[in-house]
Amino acid sequence: MPTRTQAIVLAAGRSSRFNTSAIKLSFTLCGQEMIRYPLNVLKALKIKTLVVVGYQQEIIRGILDKYSYPVECVEQTIQKGTGHALLCTRPYWTEDTLLILNGDVPLITEAHIAELMKRHRSTAATISFIASYNADPSVIGYGRVIDNGEQVSIVEQREFTGDPARECRLNAGVYLIERAFLEDTLPSLETHPSGEIFITDLIHKASEQKKKIEIVDIPFDHVRGINTLKELWVAERLVRSDIINSWMAQGVRFIAPESVVIDYDVTLSPDTVIGYGVQLLKGTQVGRKVTIDAFSVLDGAIIGDSAIIHSHSVISHASVHGMAQVGPFARVHQHSTLHAESVVGNFVEVSKTTLGHKSKAKHLTYLGQAQIGKEANIGAGTITCNYNGVSKHATIIEDGAFIGSNSALLAPVTIGKEAIVAAGSTITESVPAQALAIARQRQTTKLHYAPLIKGKHAQAPDKLKLKLATQGS
Amino acid sequence: MPTRTQAIVLAAGRSSRFNTSAIKLSFTLCGQEMIRYPLNVLKALKIKTLVVVGYQQEIIRGILDKYSYPVECVEQTIQKGTGHALLCTRPYWTEDTLLILNGDVPLITEAHIAELMKRHRSTAATISFIASYNADPSVIGYGRVIDNGEQVSIVEQREFTGDPARECRLNAGVYLIERAFLEDTLPSLETHPSGEIFITDLIHKASEQKKKIEIVDIPFDHVRGINTLKELWVAERLVRSDIINSWMAQGVRFIAPESVVIDYDVTLSPDTVIGYGVQLLKGTQVGRKVTIDAFSVLDGAIIGDSAIIHSHSVISHASVHGMAQVGPFARVHQHSTLHAESVVGNFVEVSKTTLGHKSKAKHLTYLGQAQIGKEANIGAGTITCNYNGVSKHATIIEDGAFIGSNSALLAPVTIGKEAIVAAGSTITESVPAQALAIARQRQTTKLHYAPLIKGKHAQAPDKLKLKLATQGS
Amino acid sequence: MPTRTQAIVLAAGRSSRFNTSAIKLSFTLCGQEMIRYPLNVLKALKIKTLVVVGYQQEIIRGILDKYSYPVECVEQTIQKGTGHALLCTRPYWTEDTLLILNGDVPLITEAHIAELMKRHRSTAATISFIASYNADPSVIGYGRVIDNGEQVSIVEQREFTGDPARECRLNAGVYLIERAFLEDTLPSLETHPSGEIFITDLIHKASEQKKKIEIVDIPFDHVRGINTLKELWVAERLVRSDIINSWMAQGVRFIAPESVVIDYDVTLSPDTVIGYGVQLLKGTQVGRKVTIDAFSVLDGAIIGDSAIIHSHSVISHASVHGMAQVGPFARVHQHSTLHAESVVGNFVEVSKTTLGHKSKAKHLTYLGQAQIGKEANIGAGTITCNYNGVSKHATIIEDGAFIGSNSALLAPVTIGKEAIVAAGSTITESVPAQALAIARQRQTTKLHYAPLIKGKHAQAPDKLKLKLATQGS
C-alpha cells in the first residue's frame, strides 16, 4: 500500500559511549549492521526514506550502497542535535507526514510502526510518537515523557532532574509528524545550552498549540536504543533469541540454544540437531536430519540432508552434500565441495578442492586445489603440493585411486583411475590408470645398531653422522 | 514394598507440535529418552506398568526393549484421546487402583508419586491427581482445575475460555483412580466434538457422584509437560542442573557449570576440575584430581586419577589411565587405551590402539590398530598404515622403541624392543630388537640451484623437471 | 593515609562443605586465590594485616609468600571457633582498633571497608560491623542480626530457630572493634556446646554494656561467603561479570560476554573483538583491533595490534605480533614468538620457536626449537626433528628459504638464505644459501600393477611383498 509518509532516519551522530573507532551504526547484530534494522522495517512498509549522515558518513554510505532498497542520504555537516539533523532534510520533504526514527533502535518492528501510523491517522494527530514504561532507575539515555494532564512534553535525559522511577515513561525516538506543523515550528525551536536543537521540543510546542498528540506505548525491549557495547550485546541476544525460537518451532533441535550464535540469513531444516556452542554464520544453509556437533563453526556453508558434522569442524564458504561426514577437527574452506557420502576426517584441511562421491580422506591430510573423483582413498598424512614458489597448480585424482599414507603429490600431477601410489612416496610424474607408482627408498636394517646410537655414549650421534631426531618435549 | 497399584503410561499420541519426524517421547534429556523418566519412577516404586503405544510404536517398543524393568505394551490403533487410550488397556487391568501418567512428564519424581499414593490411601479417595499453580498466561497446553467449592472439574486447554491468570491451577496429567469407579464410569464418557474421549471428564463425573477427590499440588517445574522442542530444552536444563549441582556438592569444580553438557549416567569424583563447555556424554567415568580443559568432548570415556585432558580433546569409547596426558587437539577413540603416564599430544589420533606406560606420541601422528609397549617414543608426523586396500593389519611397537619423525610404518610390521627407526623412513619390514632401520634417500645439495628454480625465469620449473611444490595460500 | 587500625583475616578453618582435599581459600576466582581478595582490599587501604592460619596452613602460607604486601601469619593449632582464632592473635595486637574479616568474603570492596571505618569513627562506636538484608530462606550459613530496639545480637546459623524470611538481616563477618573492649571482653566469652567460641557473641556483650554498636548494611552480593563449590561459582561469575563490563565500557566488543572466561590480570584494548567462548587467562595482553575467534584459549599470551586469532587456537606463554594470523586449530606455546604479519595455519604447532616477519607455516606442521627468518615459506607437513633420543638441537631457517611440503629437518641443521628444500626430503645436512637440497627417491611407475595388488586376488599383497598400507577405517 503506498503511503503519503516519508521517513527520515537519523544516522549522523557520534557514538562516543561505544569507545570504538567505528560508528556504532556499523556494528552488526546477528550479522546485519544496526542501521539496516530500521531500514528493513521501512522497506517492508514501502516508505520512501532519507538517511541523515554525518560522522563517518563514508561507512554508513558504504552499508547503504549494498542495501537493496533505494534510500537517499542527506549530510549534516555539524552535529547540532536531532532537531538540526531534521532541518538539514527540509529541502527533500515531499510527503505530507514525516516519520522520524533514530538509527539505533534495531528492535522496533514493522507492526509497531504500522500501529503508530494507524493511530496517527485514526486520531488525526499532529504528532504521534512511541513510548515505553520502564521504572528501572538504572536505565539511562532516554528522554522522559511528562504528561501532566494538560500538557505533554519530553525532557531530555541530560536535563531530567525528576525521580526516574516515578516519571518512567520513556521516549523511543520514533515520531510521526505532520509536515505542515514541522514547517511552521521546526525553524523556531530554541537552541539548548549544549548548542543543540532537539526534536523532542516539538512535543511541547504542539502541546502548547493544543494540537493532537498521540502516544503509542510498546514493550521496552522494542524501544531499546543502543548507546554502549553492553546495550548492543543485550539487543543482539534478543534478536538471536527470536531467530532460534523460530527455528525450534520448526523442528530444529538445539542441545543448548543459549550457546548458539546464529546470523539473520541462516536457514535450517526440521530434524536437524545443533550441538553446544555451534556458530552458524552468514548465509549458512543446513538441510534436514543433519547433525552438527559441539564447537563447530559454519560460515557461508551449505550442508546437505543427513550430513554429519562432527565436533570442532570449521566449514567456511564450502558445500557438504548429503550423507557426507566431516570432522572432528576438520577444516573445509575456499569453495570446496564434498560430494555425497564422502568422508573428511580429523586434522584434514580441504581447500579449493572437490572430493567425489564416497571418497575418503580421513586423517592428517592437506588437499589444496585438488579434483578428486569417486571412491578414491586418500591415505593418512597425504599432502598435495600445489605451490612451487612461482605458481600454483592442480592435482587430479581419478575415480578409485588409492593414495598410500604419508605421500606427497607435486602438482601439476594426475593420478589415474584405480591407480595406486605406494605409501611414503613423493610423486612428481603423473600415474596412468591402474598403474602403481612408488617413489621411496628400500629399507636397510642394521642389527645391534640402536644401542650404538641411542646414547650409550653421548658422542655416538655425531660420529655416526646419523640423525634420528624426533619431536621435542 | 508391593502395591495393589498398576500404572498405565500414555505414549500413543502424535507429537505434532515438535515438528520433527520422530515421536517426541524418543527424544533424550541428558542422554535418556523422555519416556524412560516416568518409567524409572514406576520402577523405583516397583509398580507393574502398561504402556499404551500407537503412533510410531516401533520406536517406543525399541526403547522399552532395552529397558531393564519389564513393561507391557498395549496398542491404541486410532488416536481418540486419553480416555480412549485408557479404555484400550481395560482387558489388562489386574489391580485395584490405577495410576495413569502421560509419558511426557519427565520431571515428576518418585517422591511426588509416593505422596500422591499416600494421600489417596489416607483420604480413601476415588480419584487423586497432581496439580500445580502457575499464573503465567503464556503457559499453555494444560487443563485447568476448576474447583467451585461444590464441584471439581478439569477443563481441557482447547475448551478453556476463562482467565488463565485467575484460573491457574493446572492439571499435571497424573491420576490415581479406583478401578471399580473406572469400570463403571469410563465406558460412559461422552465423546467431545474433536472425536476424543478425555480422562479429565472422569473428575467431573466423580464430583457429581460425590466421590472423594484428592488434589496434590506440587511445584510447576515438576509437572512440566513437553510439547515443543523449546519445552524440551527447558526441561533438559532442569535435569542437567540437578545433575551438576549434585556433583558440585560432591567436590567437583566446574569452571562454568552453565556451559557443561552432562548425561545422566556420567560419574565424576572429588577434586576434579571441569573446564568451560566440556561435554560429558554417555557413560563417561572420571576419577579424582582429573583436569578436563575447555571444549573437550568425552563420550563413553574412562579417565583415571590425576589424568590431564587438555582443551579441545575428543575422547570417545576409550580409556585414559592415571596421570596420562591428552591434547590439546587430540582424538582418542575406537576402544583405545592410554596407559598410565603416557602422553598423546596435539593433532594426534589414536584409534583401536594401546599406548603403553610412559610412551609418548606428541605431535601430528596417526596411530591406528597399533600395540605400543612401554616408554616408546613416537616421533612427530608418524603414520601407521593399517589398510592396504584389501585388508587391515596391526602394527606392534615394543618397549623403548624410538620412531623417528615423519616415518610411515606399513602394517603388519613389528618394531622390536629398543629398536630405532630413522626419521623420514617408510618401514616395510619388521625391525628386530635393538636394530636400526633406515629407509630414505641420501641428501644431494646442488649449490646455486635455488635461483634457477625459484622464478628468476618463470619457465624454469618445467625445464628442470623439478617439482618443489609446497602448500597453497 | 596511615590508620590506627590493624586487620585480622581468619583463614584457619576447614572448608568441609567444599568436599575437596584442598582448603577453599586456595581456590581461584578469575585466576586469583580467594584469600587474596580481602588481602587486596587491606593492601589498598594500607592496613597492617595478620592472617590466622591452621588447617592446611602450608597452602595458605605458600600463597601469602607470593603476595607482594607483607602480612604476618599467626597459627591457630586447634579449631575452636572464630573467637578462639581471634584470641590466638592477641600477642600481636599493636593498634587501637581491630578490623576482623573472614577470608572467604571475596566480594567485599575497598569502598565498603572504608565506609565501615568512617562510620565507626564518626559514631565513636565500640563495635561496627557489616550486614545485609536477604529474605531468601534458602540462603544459609550466615548469622542473623537480631535488633529488638533495646539490644543487638547475632545468632549463629546453627543456633538460629526463627523465621529466616522475617529475621533476614545477615552478618557478613566483617567487624571493626576497639582493642580496649576486646581485651576486656574476649577472654570471658563462653564456650558453646560445639566447643567453639564465637566473635559474634561480642555484639551481645557490647550491647549489654550499652556500648555503641554501628551496623553498615550493604548489598548481599558483596557479603557472599563461599562455603560450597556452588557458591564459589556464583561469586566467580560476579567477579568475571565486573571485569567484562569494565572492558566493554572501554570499547572491547564481546560477541557473547556470558561465554567468556577472563582472569583478573588480563588487559584488552579498544576495537578488539572477542568471540564466543574465548578463554583469556593469566596475564594475557591483547592489543587494539585484534580479532579473537570462537573457542580460542589464550594463557599468558601477548597479542599485538590488528592480529587475527582464528577459532580453536591455543596460545600459551607466547607472543603474536601485529597483523600476524594464527589458526584455526593452531597451537603456539613455550615462549614462541610470531613476528609481524607472519602466518601460522591449521594443525600447526609452534614450540620454542621464532617465526620471522611475513614467514608462513600454514598447514600440518611441527616447528620445535626453530629460529626462522623473514619471508620464509614452510610447506605443508614439515616436521622439525629436534630430539634424537639423547639431546635436543635447534633448526635454523634463514630469510626467504623455501621448505617443500612433507619434509623433515633433522636438527641441528641450518637452511640458508633463499635456499630450497625439495618436497618430500629428509634433510640431514645443512643447506647453503641459495642451494637446492633434495633427499628423496626417484619415482618408478609400474603399468598395470595396481589390479595385481589391489585385491583381485587376496594373496597378492603377500606374494608381491609390497606394502601399500594407508589409513584404517
Image (cartoon, coloured by chain):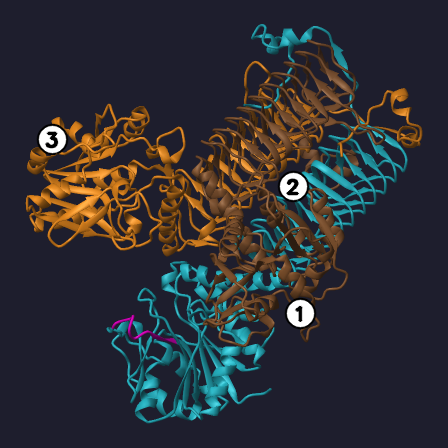
Chain colours: A orange, B cyan, C brown
Residue A134's spot in the image, x, y percent?
Answer: 29, 53
Q: CA distance from mark 1 to mark 3?
A: 79 Å
- The answer for which chain carries disc 3 is A
Main SS of the magenta part reads: loop
Residue C216 or residue C467, whichever sits in front? C216
- The answer for which chain carries disc 1 is C
Q: Disc 1 vs disc 3: which is toward the camera?
A: 1
The span shown in magenta is B163-171
The quadrant of the rendering that contains the C terminus of chain B is top right
Q: CA distance from mark 1 to mark 2?
A: 56 Å
Label disc, if present, on residue A187 of the rendered structure: 3
Q: CA distance from mark 2 to mark 3?
A: 66 Å
Horizontal arrangement in the rendering, residue C403 relative to residue A202 (left or right) = right
Label disc, if present, on residue B328 of the rendered structure: 2
- The answer for which chain carries disc 2 is B
Horizontal arrangement in the rendering, residue C204 relative to residue B423 (left or right) = left
Residue A165's spot in the image, x, y percent?
Answer: 30, 54
Q: State the SS at label 2.
A: loop
Q: State the SS at label 1.
A: loop
Q: Are marks 2 and 3 in contact (CB under 8 Å)?
A: no
- State which quadrant residue C364 falls in: top right
Label disc, if present, on residue C189 of the rendered structure: 1
- Dot 1, crowdedness within 10 Å: few (<14), some or many (≥20)? some
One can see residue A332 in this view: yes
